[in-house]
Image (cartoon, rainbow, N blue to C red):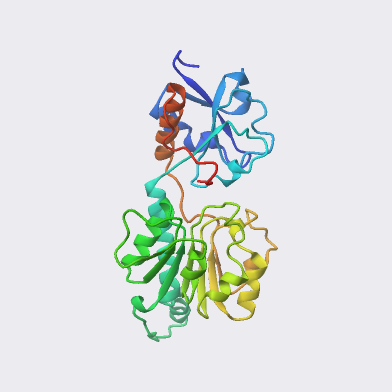
Amino acid sequence: MTNTNSILGVYLSDSLDLDAIYGNALRDEASDVVLRHPHEIDNPEDVRFAICWLPNDKAFESYPNLELAMSIGAGVDALLAHPGLKDEVHIARVRDPHQADLMAGFAAHEVLHREREFTTLEQNAAKAHWAPLTMRAPASRKVAVLGHGTMGRAVVKAVAALGFSVHVACRSEPQAPVEGVTYLTGDGAVMAAADGADYLINVLPLTATTENVLNKALFAKLAKDAWLVQIGRGEHLVEDDLLLALEHGHLGGASLDVFRAEPLPADHPFWQHECLRITPHIASDSLPEVVAGQVVDTARALRDGQPLAMGVDRARGY
């Protein structure tokens, strides 16, 4: 360690080199918060926190004094469900407003791409075919948004600003509602928001109650030819139900950015489906300097016995 007041952390990820992504920003941010790869740790008992991305089942075993596991992303479902993470270990996550802006822009883009028929326009342009298309008033088109956390709020604001009729399924009434947006709460909120919707945008966190929420019953509530924008978690979607809804012609298509298996296997039927737009989990990302600042602040709070501003409520799942 570099000084007597420093706190030691470990990078835990099998799929990402977290030091290559965030190390320079972390070192620029502070000298008293030290992070190492597991093979660089001389005394595992000195490690008090970890920053993580999809850690393997045995990732935490070597660190008996671990007090905090922090996700570099907005989602913490992998940590909440981790078999090797003790109940007494705090969980925290990054909350990056820029990440929410990126997510909102992606969602709005996917809605507009479908609504304004850009695929058809691009095909026509490739054939030098001049053919204006019919437009509809955004206010006549219902957009259902599932989820109203940091990401959901940004998505709601962005889509509502385009003039669409936005209906949101959320846990509780917002303190600062967007004018003209309908907020729905309670057990039936998801179905009520989806009822007759032309677009369904999923930005829910993954919990025991939201897993498999994108299913045939929900798809049946949507307007015929509706479009799904799936930017929550892969486990939200019942994949066979989506394929059946497309096959039967009830859904017009979907923009899918998250999947149960990532990378999406090359032989997965989604790749070849003409009604699906596939992106490789790039709807948003956290900026290294933002992640670094929040990791440093959270580690210092842990060291100093202060409340963790980025902490997660294990019972609620976010």
Q: Position of residue 159 (x, y in %)?
A: 37, 65
Pick the residue in front: 10 or 70: 70
Residue 52: image quadrant is top right
Q: As displayed, is residue 272 above or below residue 90?
A: below
Q: Is residue 275 visible?
A: no
Picture quadrant of residue 246: bottom right
Determine whether, in the image, residue 217 is placed left or right of residue 178: right
x, y percent for residue 90:
53, 33
Q: Horizontal and vertical percent for residue 178?
A: 31, 61
Which one is in front, 68 or 275? 68
Please name whichever residue, 263 or 185, is drawn nearer the observer in this view of the structure: 185
Toward the left, the furthest residue is 179
Q: Position of residue 285 (x, y in %)?
A: 46, 49
Q: Residue at x 57, y 79 (%)?
A: 250
Relative to 40, is 305 on the left or the right? left
What residue do we see at 65% from left, 55% from top? Answer: 261
- Number of numbered discs visible in the structure rendering: 0
Q: Is 60 in front, or is 115?
A: 60
244 w.r.t. 293: above or below: below
Picture layout, residue 195 above or below residue 208:
below
Residue at the image position 57 percent from the left and 51 percent from the top = 207
Q: Is residue 234 visible?
A: yes
